[in-house]
């Protein structure tokens, strides 16, 4: 998948019950595909932030933004094109780490600067945060070792500094 | 009502409605909403007890269409709420300002599958402009004020307020609240700021495009009526001498009798309205949304036209057809701005020469007027004839509320709408059964006006029970029932596109007996079968004002609505009345 097909939209929404359902419902009934979605409160507890990535080939971005704007609980929408923003995604992954491949695996962890969160000599749990595309690559490097469990958060983003 | 008075939430809800200026509520009680029905007894608000909650919703819509004020429906939880889903969806698609109050199970019981519990806000999320679940009695005045504000500003629409029983029930301590008169300052709507003023620079650009256009058409939609912009529109059209088409939602926004009016565009539009748009070099879309019933096959729609698109809802700009100039704003303000900008540019004197266009268009009007063949002796009535007789037998400010089907198209085509807010119909959702309750709502809001429902036999059987409401509540509407014994519009499609294989469209000739049925509901009833009876029956119906009247016109099922753009075809492939079809060959 080419990176610029995916645009990040950051919405500030009222922190009220049902708001996520309104946003998700809008996406499904208008046929917009969400690639990833991250929701969390902001530093102001009246508001939450919903960050999502949409495939702009699936729906015109302008319509996505305008339709979102019609939701009464959506307070602000910012569209962050890849070139003007900094984005990160977090991955937690548990990989097999038996004695035969342990050394090789530790080298990869070192090289990619992932964090070891737990190690029980059979498996290692890692945390890795980077741009989404890097997460994809890292996942490919780990796959030969045997991935037991993997969870990604979906990307979050902020506008780039001048 | 003085502020700081203690009262239960139910009373506060009724006071809040009074404070919003509500004079009529259309509703139906039940367990969860009971505590609100008690203070209704002491209120100045008139409550109209409907016979089905769908009726309450459509009455609220009819009231809003006719008066411009938001209609209010009130129903209980569970089945009461699910029964208003259709009118909410209807009001949503047609941008009708409406507030619906639903009872809900006590707050603590929500999520337990309690008796008559349903997730009303979840179910109606997709068919309302916004909805609220109120959790505290103290919030009631504020949220009711917000609901009316949202329903009536920006692009109008339905707003639902779901009220758990415990916060309105005086026997429950959670219902205690301190009254306050909610104002705009109390509203907590940080994400809602409708823009009404159009951008002056874009308005100036639009004025230049209008000045230079040789084949322009004013494409007028329901937004013009919502914005109460009919006067501004007339000034614009007359100043620049541009022909006008009024969509199904905008009939009456520009007088049908005006020489610039080409009538309705779209699937069953007038040939000249459809074709003028198709051949236009500039479509000036005012509060219209390029609905598929207007555009036909989109990639063949008005191929040479540039687009000026004015809408209060920015999401409409560019949604279907890219606009060369898209102006977000209230239609009245933007049209007034356009009138000003056009005058600034030199007004009438500097407009492009449109004499050729005007004569082409009037050529189409002469060649392809709406037409039908009068019935042969012994044949059943022609529905178009019935509508013509109704039109001629009633004052021009009569309000017409229509159902959905062939009779709706005949009514829109053959009535002459010369005043705004005289035509009420279900355009976007196409809800059969709309007309009788909508007519009742209109009459409740405009008691001094004559209100005719134009209904089909299929539609009538969906909501006829509201004639009981009309009788008992003394809301004397008149119903013209065009009984062709068929689901006529579906029959027409089966005739034209399914090789006359009629599947499940025949409704029976004499069952039900509409006369007995109408009389049983407290109405006067007249059956009309021959052309010479039509006028006198209408006259007689108009003399009866102490109860509703149903006039059953037995009409010819073989009649089809023309012109017609077949579904999936472009507007250049419009099929005209069979008697005119040969004339099409001269047109390229
Ligand atoms: C609630 C609903 N169900 C089905 C339809 C599909 N439909 C559109 S027009 C029509 C026939 C309407 O019949 P009638 O009221 O007799 O009007 P006519 O076309 O015969 O004038 C039907 C079934 C609809 N629009 N609404
Ligand atoms: Mg019929």
Image: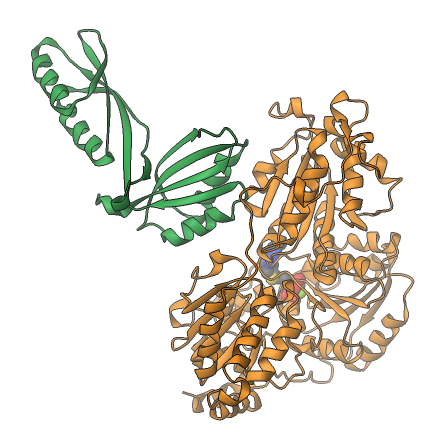
Chain colours: A green, B orange
Seen from this angle, which residue lies furthest top? A120
Q: Where is residue B481 in the image (x, y as percent from the top left)?
A: 75, 66
B209 is higher (above) or lower (below) than A52: below
Question: Can residue B262 be seen here?
Answer: no
Q: Which residue is painted at 69% across and 78% down in the image?
A: B416
Question: In terms of image quadrants, where is residue B381?
Answer: bottom right
Give residue B299's position: percent from left, percent from top. 38, 69
Q: Quick one: quadrant of the N terminus of chain B?
A: top right
Residue at the farthest front position? A162
Quadrant of the rendered image holding ligand 2: bottom right
On screen, residue B298 versus residue B256, left or right, reads left
Q: Which of A148 and A57 is in front in this view?
A: A57
Which residue occupies 83% across, 52% down?
B468
* Whether residue B234 can be seen here: yes
Residue at image point 61% right, 22% down: B112
Q: Where is residue A60 in the image (x, y as percent from the top left)?
A: 36, 53
The quadrant in which the C terminus of chain B is found is bottom left
Q: Is residue B314 left or right of residue B40?
A: left
Examine the rendered structure and indicate whether residue A132 appears above or below residue B262.
Answer: above
Q: How many marks?
A: 0
- The residue positioned 66% from the left and 74% from the top of the image is B231
């Amino acid at each position: 998948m080419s990176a610029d097909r995916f645009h990040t939209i950051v919405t500030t929404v009222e922190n009220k019950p049902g708001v996520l359902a309104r946003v998700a419902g809008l996406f499904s009934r208008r046929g917009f595909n969400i690639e990833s979605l991250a929701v969390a409160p902001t530093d102001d507890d009246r508001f939450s932030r919903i960050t999502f990535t949409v495939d702009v080939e699936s729906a015109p971005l302008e319509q996505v933004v305008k339709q979102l704007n019609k939701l009464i609980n959506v307070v602000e929408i910012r569209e962050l094109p890849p070139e003007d923003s900094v984005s990160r995604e977090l991955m937690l992954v548990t990989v097999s780490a038996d004695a035969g491949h342990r050394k090789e695996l530790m080298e990869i962890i070192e090289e990619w600067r992932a964090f070891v969160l737990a190690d029980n000599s059979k498996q290692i749990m890692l945390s890795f945060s980077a741009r989404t595309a890097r997460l994809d690559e890292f996942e490919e490097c780990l796959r030969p070792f045997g991935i037991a469990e993997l969870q990604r958060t979906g990307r979050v983003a902020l506008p780039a500094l001048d | 009502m003085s502020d700081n008075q203690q009262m239960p939430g139910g009373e506060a809800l009724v006071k809040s409605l009074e404070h919003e200026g509500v004079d009529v509520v259309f509703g139906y009680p039940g367990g969860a909403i009971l505590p609100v029905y008690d203070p209704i007894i002491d209120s100045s608000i008139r409550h109209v007890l409907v016979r089905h909650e769908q009726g309450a919703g459509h009455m609220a819509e009819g009231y809003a269409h006719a008066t411009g004020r938001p209609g209010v429906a009130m129903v209980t939880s569970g089945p009461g709420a699910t029964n208003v889903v259709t009118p909410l969806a209807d009001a949503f698609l047609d941008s009708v300002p409406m507030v619906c109050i639903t009872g809900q199970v006590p707050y603590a019981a929500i999520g337990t599958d309690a008796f008559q519990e349903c997730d009303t806000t979840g179910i109606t999320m997709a068919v309302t402009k916004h909805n609220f679940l109120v959790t505290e009695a103290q919030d009631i005045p504020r949220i009711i004020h917000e609901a009316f504000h949202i329903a009536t500003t920006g692009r109008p629409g339905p707003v639902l307020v779901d009220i758990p029983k415990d916060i309105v029930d005086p026997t429950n301590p959670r219902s205690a609240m301190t009254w306050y008169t909610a104002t705009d300052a109390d509203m907590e709507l940080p994400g809602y700021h409708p823009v009404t003023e159009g951008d002056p620079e874009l308005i100036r650009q639009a004025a230049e495009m209008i000045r230079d256009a040789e084949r322009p058409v004013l494409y007028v939609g329901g937004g013009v009526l919502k914005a109460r912009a009919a006067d501004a529109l007339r000034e614009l059209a007359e100043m620049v001498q541009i022909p006008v088409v009024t969509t199904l939602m905008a009939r009456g926004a520009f007088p049908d009798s005006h020489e610039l009016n080409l009538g309705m565009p779209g699937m069953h539009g007038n040939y000249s309205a459809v074709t003028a748009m198709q051949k236009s070099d500039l479509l000036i879309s005012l509060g219209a949304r390029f609905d598929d019933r207007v555009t036909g096959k989109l990639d063949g729609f008005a191929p040479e036209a540039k687009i000026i698109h004015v809408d209060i809802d920015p999401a409409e700009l560019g949604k279907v057809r890219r606009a060369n100039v898209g102006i977000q704003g209230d239609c009245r303000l933007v049209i007034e701005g356009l009138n000003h900008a056009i005058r600034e540019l030199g007004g009438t004197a500097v407009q492009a020469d449109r004499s050729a266009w005007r004569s082409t268009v009037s050529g189409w009007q002469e060649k392809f007027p709406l037409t039908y063949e009068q019935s042969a002796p012994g044949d059943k009535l022609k529905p178009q004839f019935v509508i013509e007789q109704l039109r001629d037998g009633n004052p021009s400010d009569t309000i017409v509320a229509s159902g959905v089907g062939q009779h709706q198209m005949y009514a829109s085509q053959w009535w002459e709408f010369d005043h705004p807010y005289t035509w009420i119909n279900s355009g976007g959702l196409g809800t059969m059964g709309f007309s009788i309750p909508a007519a009742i709502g209109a009459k409740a809001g405009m008691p001094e006006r004559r209100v005719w429902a134009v209904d089909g036999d299929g539609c009538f059987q969906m909501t006829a029970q509201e004639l009981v409401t009309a009788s008992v509540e003394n809301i004397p509407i008149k119903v013209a029932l065009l009984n062709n014994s068929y689901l006529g519009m579906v029959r027409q499609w089966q005739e034209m596109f399914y090789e006359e294989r009629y599947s499940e469209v025949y409704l029976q000739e004499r069952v039900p007996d509409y006369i007995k049925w109408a009389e049983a509901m407290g109405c006067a009833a007249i059956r009309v079968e021959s052309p010479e009876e039509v006028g006198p029956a209408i006259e007689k119906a108009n003399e009866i004002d102490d109860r509703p009247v149903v006039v059953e016109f037995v009409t010819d099922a073989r009649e089809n609505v023309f012109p017609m753009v077949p579904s999936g075809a472009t507007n250049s492939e419009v099929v005209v009345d069979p008697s005119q079809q040969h004339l099409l060959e001269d047109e390229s």
